[in-house]
Image (cartoon, rainbow, N blue to C red):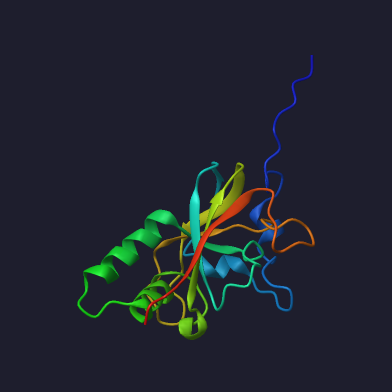
Amino acid sequence: MRVNMPNYLNQDLGFDEVRWATMRKTSYDSLASFARSPDKQLLPPGTHIFRLVQLPNGRYFEGTWWIPQNAFNELRDDVNRTKHGGGRLFRNYLAEYLALPPGASQLSVVEIELTEYVYAWVGPSAPLFQRPGGMQQIYLPNLADRGQPRVSSHARLLSTYWLKF
């Protein structure tokens, strides 16, 4: 009797096979954005992950870099405790501690929820560009359905909102 085992997104891929799958026009080695080789982890349905975008445009699932909920909440709560906290400080914190592009144009937050199990690579960010790094980040390629960056069979959009400046 043959038992069919489930096949999860990125299950059959190693990091070496996806670490160059970054952007449509350019490519870089994603390994440099981690302080050490990331761990391949199975993320369960119900997992909330975040990322910053310039403007909400509906193409939420094509990005590969995500922020785990605990790291996002830690930085947001720290900003909320400051007298002069706001979107600019939050964006700067994210740029300091995660391997994200410079944040001057990142004005909005996207929150999604995984609806299926997916494999992603998780690890601490590298100290790039004289920034300390060190926070957990998620590298999750192939989340968008092939040829449809606005659709994912593995996640759903929960919310988008503007950062208050």
Q: Residue at x 58, y 52 (%)?
A: 120
Q: Farthest residue toward the top?
A: 1
Given residues 103 and 14, the one toward you in this image is: 103
Query: Where in the figure is residue 53, as x and y percent of width and height?
Result: 54, 74
Q: Residue at x 65, y 74 (%)?
A: 28
Query: Where in the figure is residue 83, as x and y percent of width and height?
Result: 20, 77
Q: Farthest residue toward the bottom?
A: 104
- The number of numbered badges drawn on the structure is 0
Q: Residue at x 47, y 81 (%)?
A: 103
Task: Give the quadrant of residue 79.
Answer: bottom left
In the displayed structure, 25 sits above or below 138; it is below
Look at the image and tell me in which quarter the N terminus lies.
top right
Query: Where in the figure is residue 106, as x and y percent of width and height?
Result: 50, 79
Given residues 38 and 3, the one toward you in this image is: 3
Look at the image and tell me in which quarter the C terminus lies.
bottom left
In the displayed structure, 76 sits above or below 6; it is below
- Left or right of 75 in this view: 9: right
Task: Give the quadrant of residue 78.
Answer: bottom left
Q: Residue at x 52, y 78 (%)?
A: 101
Query: Where in the figure is residue 72, as x and y percent of width and height?
Result: 40, 62
- Left or right of 77 in this view: 120: right
